[in-house]
Image (spheres, rainbow, N blue to C red):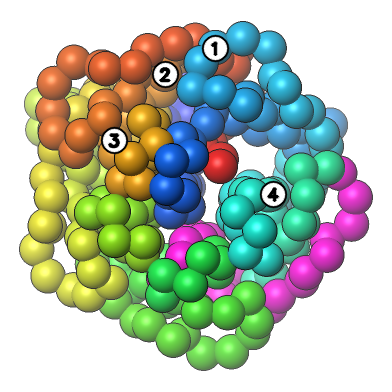
């Protein structure tokens, strides 16, 4: 499958490859790719730069799992997890092995997200669910446990091919919601909220191409604010502000193959 077809499928199904967890002050986010092969292979860099993977491990199934990163135990380190049907299976170290935390949450048609929704320094689970009216419901938990949503927000449109992104867009220590929407001119609109509430976008930025790019969100310069970026083939093109413009950070990481998804960790 060509990369354009993969990106189209991502838009159509809400399979976001751009999940981010909130930035930790003075700790820049770092690039990672997850390679779908006989297993899920995680390839992590320890700097905002290209080069070989610094950390490599295998965790999850390429046929039934979707990868996420989060600080599940509040130790200031993002570690892997996967969403499998109605479960989250989380690890507390960047190593392979069995899930250390298994949580039943969400439905089979939900898209998994993670973030620090209450600013307590721990990332917790959530899902995004398309509604009958074509809008998106965000169902967020403030603990990594089963139960009903602690926060429910309606934001974004499945009909507009929005897909969810998460980040601390104003540097207040709390992760909030956003969507990326393909425009008629084939560019990408980042429509970001500074609170986990419904409403219009607090921050809007046009950046990247809906034809060639996969969006990513991260704190690229360590200022405790998450900002926009895209991955084009294997080139990471990142901005240090939530505005349009040219890439302020650019490097190559990953192979650019169709079986690799870019993620953001740390």
Q: Mark 3 sits on what residue?
A: 228
Kindly identify which residue carries mark 1.
50
On residue 236, which mark appears? 2
Q: From this view, report whether residue 14 is shown above or below residue 72.
A: above
Q: CA distance from mark 2 to mark 1?
A: 9 Å
Pick whichever of labels 3 and 2 is earlier in the sequence: 3
Q: How many marks?
A: 4
Q: CA distance from mark 1 to mark 4?
A: 21 Å
* Left or right of 222, for residue 107: right
SS class, disc 2: strand
Magenta stretch in the rendered image: 96-117
Which quarter of the image is occupied by the C terminus? top right
CA distance separating discs 3 and 1: 18 Å
| Helix, strand or loop status at disc 4 | strand
User: Is tag 4's residue or tag 2's residue first in the polypeptide sequence?
Assistant: 4
- Residue linked to disc 4: 80
Structural distance between the alpha carbons of marks 4 and 2: 21 Å
In the image, taking residue 69 as reference, residue 116 lies left or right, namely left
**Is 30 in front, or is 221?**
221
Q: Residues within 10 Å of mark 2 (few under 14, many from 20)?
A: many
Alpha-carbon neighbours of circle 3 within 10 Å: few (<14), some, or many (≥20)? many
Query: Which mark sits nearer the N-terminus, 2 or 1?
Result: 1
């Amino acid at each position: 499958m060509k990369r354009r077809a993969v990106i189209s499928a991502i838009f159509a199904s809400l399979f976001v490859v751009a999940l981010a967890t909130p930035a930790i002050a003075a700790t820049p986010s770092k690039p990672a790719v997850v390679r779908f092969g006989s297993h899920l292979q995680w390839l992590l860099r320890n700097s905002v730069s290209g080069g070989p993977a610094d950390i490599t491990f295998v965790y999850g199934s390429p046929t039934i799992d979707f990868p996420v990163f989060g600080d599940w135990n509040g130790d200031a380190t993002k570690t892997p997890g996967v969403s499998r049907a109605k479960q989250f299976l989380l690890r507390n170290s960047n190593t392979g092995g069995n899930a250390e935390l298994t949580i039943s949450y969400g439905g089979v048609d939900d898209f998994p997200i993670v973030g620090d929704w209450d600013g307590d320094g721990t990332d917790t689970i959530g899902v995004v669910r398309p509604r009958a009216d074509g809008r998106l419901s965000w169902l967020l938990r403030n603990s990594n446990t089963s139960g009903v949503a602690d926060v429910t927000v309606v934001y974004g449109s499945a009909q507009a091919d929005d897909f969810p992104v998460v980040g601390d867009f104003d540097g207040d220590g709390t992760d909030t919601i956003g969507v990326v929407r393909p425009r008629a001119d084939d560019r990408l609109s980042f429509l970001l909220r500074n609170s986990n509430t419904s409403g219009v976008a607090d921050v809007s930025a046009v950046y990247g191409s809906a034809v060639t790019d996969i969006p990513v969100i991260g704190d690229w310069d360590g200022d405790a604010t998450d900002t926009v970026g895209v991955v084009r083939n294997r080139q990471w093109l990142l901005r240090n502000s939530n505005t349009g413009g040219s890439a302020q950070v650019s490097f190559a990481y990953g192979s650019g193959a169709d079986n690799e998804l870019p993620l953001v960790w740390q």
